[in-house]
Amino acid sequence: MANFSNKIVVITGGSDGIGKSLVQQFLTLGAKVATCGRNADKLAQLSSDNPSQDLFTMQVDVANQAQTEAFIKAVTDKWGGLDILINNAGISMRALVSEVSIETLKNVMDINFWGTVYTTKAALPYIQKANGVIVGVSSIAGYRGLPGRSGYSASKYALNGWLEALRTELYGSGTHVMWVCPGFTSSNIRNAALNKDAKAQGESPMDEGAMMSSEECSNHIINAIVKRKRTLVLTFTGKRTVFMNKFFPAWADKLAYHFFFKNGKLVK
């Protein structure tokens, strides 16, 4: 693992799950870390757990362009630049297309896609100056549309396409753009996932204990940043899903249906 001494790292959505683990690991590796989230209490607890002058937190809703731009400005005013941006803030959903509200779909897109756009656009000049790294935390749902997660899949497809276009525009410039797909990783994202009425479902339909931990996932992400990988797909299930969907799409439809449905009802 590389030494990130005095590197300035911005991580959105750092008060929970993968984001929180990334914050803690980068601090351990010597970085100056700035993170944001919507929950002030969780941010306060994060600061309390990591009493370091090298951690800066700010309450921000990344779906709000003005708040996001103010966050990046606060970071660059404090430390004078920015080396690594990890667009981690995200929200999921669980509802059939026939039942889901437009509000749910819009909320998911605003956070997952537009939140990344706002943050990246604000940070881009500083990242380019540092020949730094821009990371999007995507999902297997950005390669394979998942039933019950139509809005989530759409947001991650959009994220992948947007970052790929940006990476191509910056080709040969020294600035690196990548995205990572954690697969099924234990985190709060399924508990906070929106239902058909844009309310948090408050529980996970998946077996969280059988999934990769947030700590292991964040370790893989940091190693991928060090190696400047193009993309990173984690877990055997994730790699298999991407492979199957690319080479055997009809079979992937069948497998996905039987994984998420039982007796015609969405159960996962």
Image: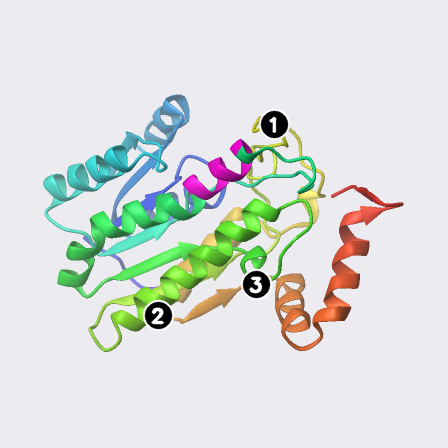
Residue 84, compared with residue 188, is above or below; it is below
Amino acid at the residue labelled 1? Asp
Badge 2: few (under 14), some or many (20 or more) residues near its Cα, within 10 Å? some
Start-end of magenta stretch: 103-111
- Report the residue marked by disc 1: 197
Mark nearer the viewer, 1 or 2: 1
- Residue 228 is marked as 2
The residue drawn where x is 69% and y is 41% is 96
CA gap, disc 2 and disc 3: 21 Å
Q: Is residue 10 visible?
A: no
Percent position (x, y) of residue 85? Answer: 29, 53
- Report the residue marked by disc 3: 143
Q: Residue furthest top?
A: 41
SS label for mark 1: loop
Q: Does 68 sit left or right of 76 as displayed?
A: right
> Is residue 104 on the magenta stretch?
yes
Residue contact at pointers 3 and 1, CB within 8 angstroms:
no
The residue drawn where x is 40% and y is 39% is 13
- Residue 239 is marked as none
State the image quarter where residue 144 is shown.
bottom right
Amino acid at the residue labelled 2? Arg
